[in-house]
Image (cartoon, rainbow, N blue to C red):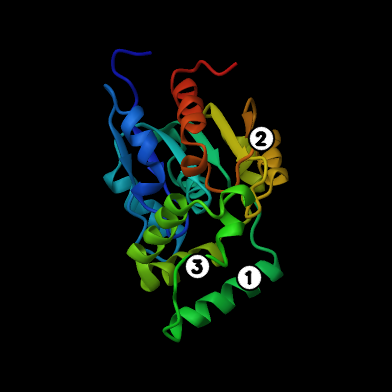
Amino acid sequence: MSDDPLPLLLLPGLLCDAALWAHQLRHLGAGRTVEVADLRHDDTFPAMAARVLAAAPARFALAAHSMGGYLAFELMRQAPERIARLALLGTGARPDTEEQRLRRRLLVDLARRGRFRGVTPRLLPLFVHPDRVEEKALAATVMTMAERLGAATFLRQQHAIMQRPDSRGLLPAIAAPTLVVCGREDAATPLALSEEIAAGIPGARLAVIEECGHLAPLERPQAVTVLLRLWLEGALP
């Protein structure tokens, strides 16, 4: 590793914050600046990206999960020269389908009518491996993050997600060494979406984490940390 390692910037997903990256913050920060971007304040990805870039180091490694991956593509549009390495976890390059937009609009409508409940136990199977739905500590972390961010952030983030462009055309232009990670049983962003990204970015490496759902940094934190360390060091096989 370089004597002056690249800073690492972490982008959380919808209704997630630094708690998503707790293991990585603890274990990747030795001799390296590691920060989690605050994505609560904007309702479009261009605005979100401008805010992130204003606070970010001049050049950095970027790891992004889910919604954070949509933002990562916007960062690559605005300032590709500043992103030295890119890791995309549990995300996709396609825009929403009409069915997905309809589902989001229904959730947005509930939130606007004062019925926001964050991530409820009913929604957990979409985010974690089926075998882990009953794990109280994991469920509590996910639901507490959602409650902490709240309805106003949820509305802004969903607006950004529904307005995002198709990023598939951007993939061949990404020159940063890229790692794509997906849980084998990710129900929110199925493996085919990660395979599509890895196939589209020149030289990208795809890593599939077994017995893992959508929230890989929480569900399989050690595996994610090992992969990110190898990616940061340019040592992926």
Residue type at numbered disc 2: Ala
Say the numbered circle drawn on residue 101.
Answer: 1
- Give the labeled residue for mark 3: 120
Q: How many marks?
A: 3
In front of the other: 160 or 126:
126
Say the numbered circle drawn on residue 198.
Answer: 2
Q: Which x, y percent locates residue 112?
A: 44, 83
Asked if marks 2 and 1 touch (Cβ < 8 Å), the reply is no
Residue type at numbered disc 3: Thr
Residue 132 seen by the camera: yes
Disc on the earlier residue, 2 or 1: 1
Disc on the earlier residue, 1 or 3: 1
Which SS class for mark 2? Answer: helix
Q: Which x, y percent locates residue 234?
A: 49, 18
**Side of 121 where 6 appears, left or right:** left
**Side of 178 where 149 appears, left or right:** left
Residue type at numbered disc 1: Arg
Nearer to us of marks 3 and 2 is: 3
